[in-house]
Image: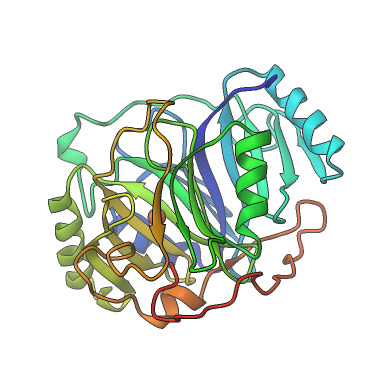
Amino acid sequence: MDFHIIRVARTVLNVTDLDRSRKFYIDALGFIETKSTDTHIYLRGLEEIHHHSLVLQKAQSPSVEVISYKVANDKDLNALEHLFSSKGLKTKWMDKGSQHAMGRALRTQDVSGLPIEFFHEMNQVERLLQRYDLYKGSRVQRIDHVNCAVPNVQKAHDFYCQELGFSCSEDTVDEDGMLWASWLHRKHSVHDQAFMNGVGPRLHHIGFWLPDPLALIHACDVLASLDYAQSIERGPGRHGLSNAFFLYLRDPDGHRIELYNGDYLTCDPDVGPLHWQLDDPRRQTFWGAKAPDCWFDEASDVLDIHTGEICQAEEPLLKKKKPEFII
Ligand SMILES: [Fe+2]
């Protein structure tokens, strides 16, 4: 491959009320505010040296503008533009300076219709890892992954593995052997990008890494103290798949955030994917508790990179045979 994707690095969320979002993300969850304007809030975790990993952008309705990946070199962007164009997929250049604190970037609509962006350059700021005096709320450390619902997981999986150089750490197959979900990584964790069979393209959630499981429990207490108990959608619990400790939250606009800790190293290239069966209840929750219906049914709409309109979501290729187990 003529390019090197490093990791998922940020997401741009459209939100309807910046003050309301600020209370949730900064006051309750403890994100670090790098910069704010009348229209944007740029957030990062305590460990992060890059300017931001989450952008909250004022808009009329909630949606996802783009999911961004960092690449190793600026020239990688040209190679990626060539790849996506050769596949007949839309591309769009974002000039240096057109996005705050960032160099030029390449946007594309991937094979599932997800708005994806690649960039190399982002301003660096102070890493606050040892500023323990600033640890608040869930003590968010860094962005870890995104999880998207797509109508054809096999198609998305094949494109990311064969064309973009991702590796699969774990997957789920149904009783017919069809790929139901796939966990793909560039960095050496379980995933940067997960795909699940569902109405899509939509963003199911953004996962942020916490320092330890106790930070996750403390986050529940802080959320409840600030009257956000109803924002807790699922968990805390432990996934069978990935082994991670998890808590799923819904932000004031309905975007889903996962607080996440405790997966494992995936740096050995000779270790193949761990396969799960769709009807194995330990896969989604190791302790057996079921997820609520809204966790399966609801996700954030994504936008067309050219028109800014919501991408039309399609029904999934695979149909549920056992609706209680559908991660
Ligand atoms: Fe996740």
> Percent x, y for residue 261?
25, 47
> Percent x, y for residue 236?
22, 65
**Horizontally, is 325 left or right of 168 in the view?**
left
The residue positioned 64% from the left and 71% from the top of the image is 316
Q: Which image quadrant for residue 278?
A: bottom left
The residue positioned 71% from the left and 17% from the top of the image is 75
Q: Ligand 1, what quadrant?
A: bottom left
- Eyeballing the image, is 287 above or below 128? below
- Eyeballing the image, is 231 above or below 115? below
> Percent x, y for residue 258?
36, 58
> Percent x, y for residue 83?
78, 32
- The one nearer the camera, 157 or 33, is 157
Q: Quadrant of the C terminus?
A: bottom left
Q: Quadrant of the N terminus?
A: top right
The residue positioned 59% from the left and 77% from the top of the image is 319
Count numbered badges in the picture: 0
Residue 44 visible? The answer is: no
- Eyeballing the image, is 183 above or below 288? above
Residue 69 visible? The answer is: yes
- The one nearer the camera, 88 or 180, is 180
**Horizontally, is 104 left or right of 291 in the view?**
right
**Horizontally, is 315 left or right of 171 in the view?**
right
Type of colouring: rainbow
Q: Farthest residue in the front direction? A: 176
- Eyeballing the image, is 136 above or below 19? above
Q: Which image quadrant for residue 118?
A: top right
- The one nearer the camera, 181 or 143, is 181
- The one nearer the camera, 291 or 298, is 291
